[in-house]
Image: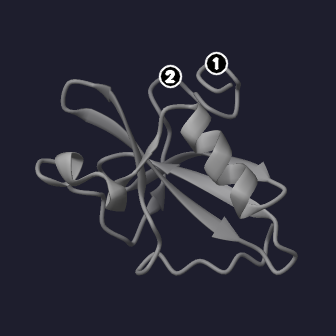
Amino acid sequence: MDNLKIDFGIAEYWVKVVDFLQQNWALISEDDNGRARINFISDTGGIFDELDFESINHAREALIANRFREFSDSPDLQSFLHPPVAPFHQSAHPNGPIYSSGRFWR
């Protein structure tokens, strides 16, 4: 998925509150063939993991199954959370690749 069309300026954030004052953010991007990638982003803007899917619909279904919520559809979360701001950077998660390893992903 080298040729991703990513416009983080208009991307829809997904969020999962994992602990008090800590959340994981996700953005879905699509390649020229309709395949999708979820990038997982920390509060500080570090991309710490990623997963690939056959389509955006599969990616959305997987996020929902793993208790992520669409930020734009969550006024309660918008009242106190603020998504990370681009530009993003590569970073490591303290617990390694938590989603792509399958440890915290169904």
Tag 1 residue:
103
- Residue 4 or 106: which is nearer the viewer? 106
Question: Helix, strand, or loop for circle 2?
Answer: loop
Placement of the C terminus among the 4 image quadrants: top right
State if disc 1 and disc 2 touch (CB < 8 Å). Answer: yes
Q: What residue type is labelled 2?
A: Asn
Percent position (x, y) of residue 102? 70, 24
Which one is earlier in the sequence, the residue at label 2 or at label 1? Answer: 2
Q: Callout 2 environment at 10 Å: few (<14), some (14 to 19), or many (20+)? A: few
Tag 2 residue:
95
- The residue depicted at 64 percent of the width and 27 percent of the height is 105
Placement of the N terminus among the 4 image quadrants: bottom right
- The residue depicted at 81 percent of the width and 65 percent of the height is 35
Q: Is residue 55 above or below residue 46?
A: below
- Residue 70 or 5: which is nearer the viewer? 70
- The residue depicted at 29 percent of the width and 57 percent of the height is 83
